[in-house]
Amino acid sequence: MAKRGYVYIMSNKRRTTFYVGVTSNLPRRVQEHKEGIGSAFTSKYKCTDLVYFEEHQSIYLAIVREKQLKQWHRPWKIRLIRTMNPEMKDLAGDLM
C-alpha cells in the first residue's frame, strides 16, 4: 500500500509570502515549520501558518501536485487557499 501524501501551503502572518511543500506527515512537518526547522525559505520569511492542504492517495501524486502548484501565479494560489480557508487563518490548530 502506498504511503499517503499531503501538499500544503504555509504563509507568514501578513499573508505576503507563500510556500508550497509536500510531506507524508502533515502535523509533524507543520510543527517543524513553526519551530523554524522546516526549511531555509520558511525560516527566512517566517512562514509559520498553515493556510491550505490537500491529502493524496500516494506521496507520488502529492509530489506531482506540488510541482504543479509551484508553477502557479500568486493570485491563483490565493484563490485556491480561499476555497478551503476563506479567512486565510492558520489551520494548524485543527491538525494538532
Image: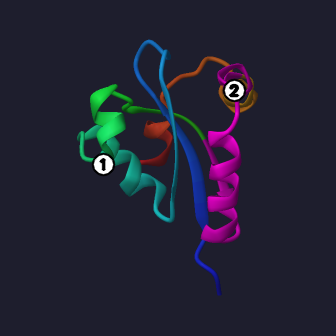
> Residue shown at 24%/46% (left/top)?
37
Image position, residue 65 (x, y; %): 70, 53
Image position, residue 69 (x, y; %): 67, 42
Of the residues shown, which amino acid type is indicated by label 1?
A: Glu
The dominant secondary structure in magenta is helix
The mark that comes first in sequence, 1 or 2, is 1
| Residue numbers of the magenta segment | 53-78
Q: Secondary structure at mark 1?
A: helix
Quadrant of the frame with the N terminus: bottom right
Image quadrant where residue 76 sits: top right
Q: Is residue 93 left or right of residue 2?
A: left
Q: Is residue 70 left or right of residue 27?
A: right
Q: Is residue 65 magenta?
A: yes
> Residue shown at 60%/69% (left/top)?
59
Residue behind mark 2: 73
Q: Is residue 58 depicted above or below 43 in this figure?
A: below
Which disc number belongs to residue 62? none
> Residue shown at 39%/53% (left/top)?
29
Image position, residue 92 (x, y; %): 45, 39
Image quadrant where residue 70 sits: top right
Image quadrant where residue 80 sits: top right
Q: Secondary structure at mark 2?
A: loop
Q: Is residue 33 depicted above or below 23 in this figure?
A: above
Q: CA distance from mark 1 to mark 2?
A: 26 Å
Residue at the front extreme of this rendering: 71
Mark 1 or 2, closer to the camera? 2
> Residue shown at 70%/65% (left/top)?
61
Mark 1 surroundings within 10 Å by alpha-carbon count, few (fewer than 14), some (14 through 19), many (20 or more): some
